[in-house]
Image (tube, rainbow, N blue to C red):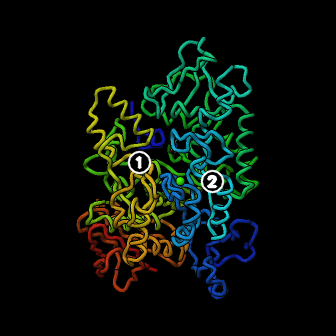
Amino acid sequence: MDKRCFTEPVKPLSYRSIINFKQLHLFDDPDMKLFNIKLKELIIATGLMLLSGSGFAQPMKNTNQPEINRKWWKEAIFYQIYPRSFMDSNGDGIGDLKGIISKLDYVKSLGVDAVWLNPVYASPNYDNGYDISDYQNIMKEFGVMQDFDVMLKGFHDRGIKVIMDLVVNHCSSEHKWFKAARISRKSRYYNYFHWWPAENGAPPKRWSAFDPDANAWKYNKATNSYYLHYFAAQQPDLNWENPKLRQEIYKMMRFWLDKGIDGFRMDAIAYISKDLTFPPLHAKYHGDWAMYYAGGPHLHEYIKEMNRQVLNKYNAATVAEAMGTVNDVMKFVDPVRSELNMAYHFEGVNIGYLPNEYKMVNPKGYGLLKFKRVYSKWDSAFATKGWGTIYLGNHDQPRMVTRWGNDSPEFREVSSKMLTTFILSMGGTPYYYFGDELGMSNIKFDKISDYNDIELLTNYAQVKAKGGDTNRFIEGMKISSRDNGRTPFQWNASANGGFTTGKPWLKVNPNYISVNVEAEEKDTNSVLNYFKEMVKLRKSNLAFVYGKYTLIDAGNPDVYAYTRELNNDKYLIVLNFHAKTAATNVGFDMTGIKTMINNYADGPVTDNAGQITLKPYEAAVFKIK
Ligand code: NOJ
Ligand code: CA
């Protein structure tokens, strides 16, 4: 059985403008001032000139691109904050809301439009907030509700929207519903969870991601039944087949939306519906159980209901953690289905692992050809309907520069910038992980005792129990473990990177001495300043959001090259993914073509035969039209 993270399914998953002024519905869409723009009807640049400066009106020529429906969440750059590691205000070593409040201006300075905040709800923290014991309260380590309100207002005052995690496939075993349910089968909360009565014999096999025995059923003596937990035993699955439970969840969602949050990132949402007969799993799911879990019988009925009863009343932005094939994922985001807005897939971040092992990267590397195929496939899936996302890091992933670039002293900065160029020039909404803008890299713990992550510790215990090679495991985790992406943010060169005056909950990467905000703000060539420039570039032209993506030189194993084109604007992006000089031929004369951004002091060498020669990890964006 494959033991990779539950959140990372096992197999690579096969799983505009003359604006037509009659269609200009300014303020129809409260959060975005939606223009219904018809690209085809592009005409008179003159009228648009008057609007220039709004950032929404670009003189565009007539092309045959499909109609686009502008939304703020399509055009936004999201910045993900892992609160536990962002900023500690009181010296207890744990990041908190007051810490975030003290750094609102930093977030503003990045130029991002929205923040995704990992869970801040009350939690005993078996899975760092993904085990919620009270959905309408703040985790005591993070502060109180008033801090949340101040933080939300602070973001809004700066024009930054906030989406929160919605973790409703499961709650915490310390949630009052579960505490009551586990006492008696007669409890009114018993059916808020999934149970298998012991008198029916042993429950049918279900795998668990964070269980030492990988068993998703746990026996509960008081009720003489087993409860289901796809994740840890401290994370019992909620019973979505029970309409009462669904109403509780919707009520809770309204509570947060009424406060003014701008939407939700939906954790493990694909797993919420279960076949209550719990049939034995078909052999085809063996080793690929996430695929089975993600296809529950009433999943989309419930999402549609949630949309009808909650989401569409608030115009909330939503992003689904969505496992599966393009077809599976499309179901969440095809607008005609009225479910969710955006989805993120796992096929990209799962590239380059050895088969049948827990997150062991292939020593040969991940293969750029495969990388290009996967991102091109998902781009074309969303080119005509639905909406995707683009990301290379988050709290479930290692640091992007270590995993996808090169964190050696020679190449850390330049490859970080190259990856940032990729994320911010591709289609789909970028979800950019905090710290990547500094080029933060994996800490690479040598000792198991340095780790905190339940997923990693569970898998380590399993390797050990089977007499496996724990040294090899630790070596592998230096590249892939989630804790690499969770080390505290690096603000300055003072002790613990200025994150805390106390003992940080997870060690700070010792490279904070040079990799930190204060140093990088001063250095015009820093990764941080490059990120800000790239943010500006993305926001300067809608081609980066709505433009057609065309892969060029697909068979080039070192260079990822593509164009983004919208009406009369066309950009060429060239990215060398390797530590050696590489060339691509784009097939047209590059003489006189304007370079918009480049991660070296002297730009790439181009010629009139379309040849572009790139230095190691060089990235450039050209405006070719
Ligand atoms: C996905 C979250 O991103 C991850 O951090 C968590 O462990 C699981 N879902 C369980 O909630
Ligand atoms: Ca604190």
Amino acid found under the numbered disc labelled 2: Thr
Q: Nearer the viewer, mark 1 or mark 2?
A: 1
Ligand 1 has an atom within 8 Å of the beta carbon of the residue at disc 1: no
Comparing 352 with 107, the one in front is 107
Amino acid found under the numbered disc labelled 1: Asp
Comparing 223 with 41, the one in front is 223
Disc 1 or 2, which lies upstream in sequence?
2
Residue at horizontal 25%, vertical 63%?
579
| 325 versus 497 height, above or below | above
Q: Secondary structure at mark 2?
A: strand
Residue at horizontal 54%, vertical 66%?
103
Which class describes the residues within 10 Å of circle 2: few (<14), some (14-19), or many (20+)? many
Q: Which residue is mark 2?
A: 318
Ligand 1 has an atom within 8 Å of the beta carbon of the residue at disc 2: no
Q: Is the residue under label 2 in contact with that under label 1 (CB below 8 Å)?
A: no
Residue 126 % position (x, y): 51, 38
Which quadrant: the N terminus?
top left
Q: Quadrant of residue 620?
A: bottom left
Comparing 484 with 554, the one in front is 484
Residue 240 % position (x, y): 67, 34
